[in-house]
Image (cartoon, helix red, strand yellow):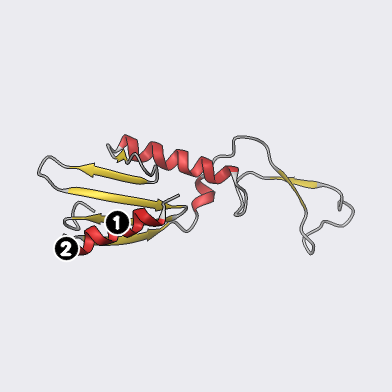
């Protein structure tokens, strides 16, 4: 996850260099994650099927609160960014940078499902 110091540095750069910034939030982050292993859960109170109270559900998609799906989300996201020629910073693997041949650049910070994108103009962003 993005360290607070990374966010501060990027916000200072944005202010000093008069960069453009945008923010994104992926609403259904964990619905895009494929589960590596089978995960089962007990039935919630109020949703128990009469006569089958002792049965469990096998999850087809992830739920918020599970830790392993967050790792899968990051792997999928990281793979996407690498495919689009973004590089990771050495100090923070949730900070991505892409440099263009015209000297412009885009900085991309990821914090779970929230994203901050900064660049010289909105076309690159």
For label 1, the SS is: helix
- Residue drawn at x 31%, y 50% is 108
Q: Tag 1 or tag 2, which sits nearer the N-term?
A: 1
Seen in the image, is 24 located left or right of residue 74? left
- Residue drawn at x 28%, y 56% is 10
Among the 4 quarters of the image, the one containing residue 59: top right
Q: Quadrant of the C terminus?
A: bottom left
Give percent across and percent down for residue 89.
Answer: 32, 41
- Residue drawn at x 37%, y 55% is 5
Seen in the image, is 109 located left or right of residue 19? right
Residue that protrudes farthest toward the right in the picture = 51
Q: Which callout, 2 or 1, points to the residue nearer the camera?
A: 1
Seen in the image, is 16 located left or right of residue 82? left
Q: Which mark is residue 53?
A: none
How many residues crowd around disc 2 within 10 Å: few (fewer than 14), some, or many (20 or more)?
few
Q: Is residue 58 above or below residue 48?
A: above
Q: Is residue 95 above or below residue 114?
A: above
Q: Is residue 104 above or below residue 10?
A: above
What is the distance, in whole Å, between disc 2 and disc 1 at their CAs? 14 Å
Give percent across and percent down for residue 66.
Answer: 62, 49
How many residues crowd around disc 1 within 10 Å: few (fewer than 14), some, or many (20 or more)?
few
Q: Which mark is residue 18?
A: 2
Give percent across and percent down for residue 67.
Answer: 60, 46
- Residue drawn at x 40%, y 57% is 4
Residue annotated with mark 1: 9
């Amino acid at each position: 996850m993005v360290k607070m110091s990374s966010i501060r540095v990027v916000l200072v750069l944005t202010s000093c260099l008069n960069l453009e910034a945008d923010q994104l939030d992926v609403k259904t982050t964990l619905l895009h994650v494929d589960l590596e292993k089978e995960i089962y859960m007990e039935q919630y109170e109020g949703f128990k099927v009469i006569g089958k109270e002792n049965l469990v559900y096998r999850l087809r998609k992830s739920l918020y609160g599970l830790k392993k799906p967050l790792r899968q989300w990051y792997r999928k996201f990281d793979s996407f960014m690498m495919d689009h020629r973004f590089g990771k910073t050495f100090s923070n693997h949730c900070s991505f940078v892409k440099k263009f041949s015209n000297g412009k650049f885009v900085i991309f910070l990821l914090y779970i499902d929230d994203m901050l994108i900064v660049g010289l103009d909105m076309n690159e962003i």
